[in-house]
Image: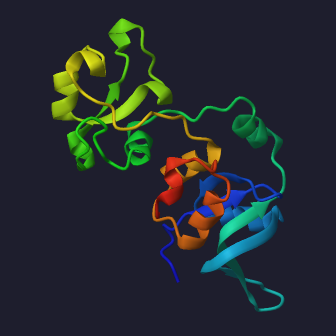
Amino acid sequence: MYSLNQQVLRTDPAGVPLEWIGYQEAVKLHCLSEVCATFGRMLYHIHGGTNAVTGRQSRITIHAILATRADGALYDRVFRDYIPPLSNRALFRRDAHLCLYCGDSFPTNHLSRDHVTPLSRGGRDEWTNSVTACKRCNNRKAGRTPEEAGLGLLAIPFAPNHAEYIYLKGRRILADQMEFLKAHFPRTSPLCMRDS
């Protein structure tokens, strides 16, 4: 059995990853008969109340991956010109907590978001213009381009697709959840080679 903090991967009926949900939302979806299928390992059993007539206690089994009925509003949000929101947590995870200038690995509190083309020079705060940088390299670069600062960029910044973004937002991703997500990554995704 897993801790109730273990996230559940919610998909559409065709198995396209939609979002991470907690156990409460998973139970709600089961109770509303919104779950079409379950995949992956069993995470936990949730026990409910006791039926006054039958004397039996309700119990719901939650699996790592739940395929749910179509949700039009969620579909619109996910698939119509969707660009995942940029956050430092997701950015640092995209770049594997490496400074993309010096190549060293750092804890989160020693990292910062750097704009390849500085905002002061017309750059945008978006995935394709943002990289993880240690504070030392970011200060060295300042308001210049990497070339002007004499810094090489070790990887080209990219905007993740929705499945990649779900991976970036996940916590303690289980092996079966990771395998499921990787099936939806582009073949050339730098994230394909990672474990959870």
Residue 83 visible, this angle: yes
Q: Which is more toward the observer, 34 or 98?
A: 98
Residue 71 horizontal/vertical position (percent): 81, 47
Residue plotted at (83% across, 58% down): 13
Instruction: Kindly indicate the quadrant of the structure image that contains residue 149.
Output: top left
Query: Residue 166: x and y, percent?
Result: 57, 50
Q: Residue at x 26, y 44 (%)?
A: 103
Q: Is residue 86 above or below residue 120?
A: below
Q: Is residue 1 above or below residue 130?
A: below
Pick the front one: 15 or 43: 15
Task: Establish if 1 lies above or below 89.
Answer: below
State left or right for residue 179 relative to residue 31: left
Q: Nearer the viewer, residue 106 or 189?
A: 189
Res. 23 visible in picture = no
| Residue 174, horizontal then vertical, whole percent | 53, 70
The figure's colour scheme reads rainbow
- In the picture, measured across the screen, residue 167 lies left or right of residue 91, that is right
64 relative to 151 in the view: left or right = right
Q: Position of residue 94 (x, y in %)?
A: 44, 45
Kindly identify the residue that appears in the image at 36 percent across and 23 percent down.
115
| Residue furthest top in the image | 121
Q: Nearer the viewer, residue 37 or 33?
A: 37
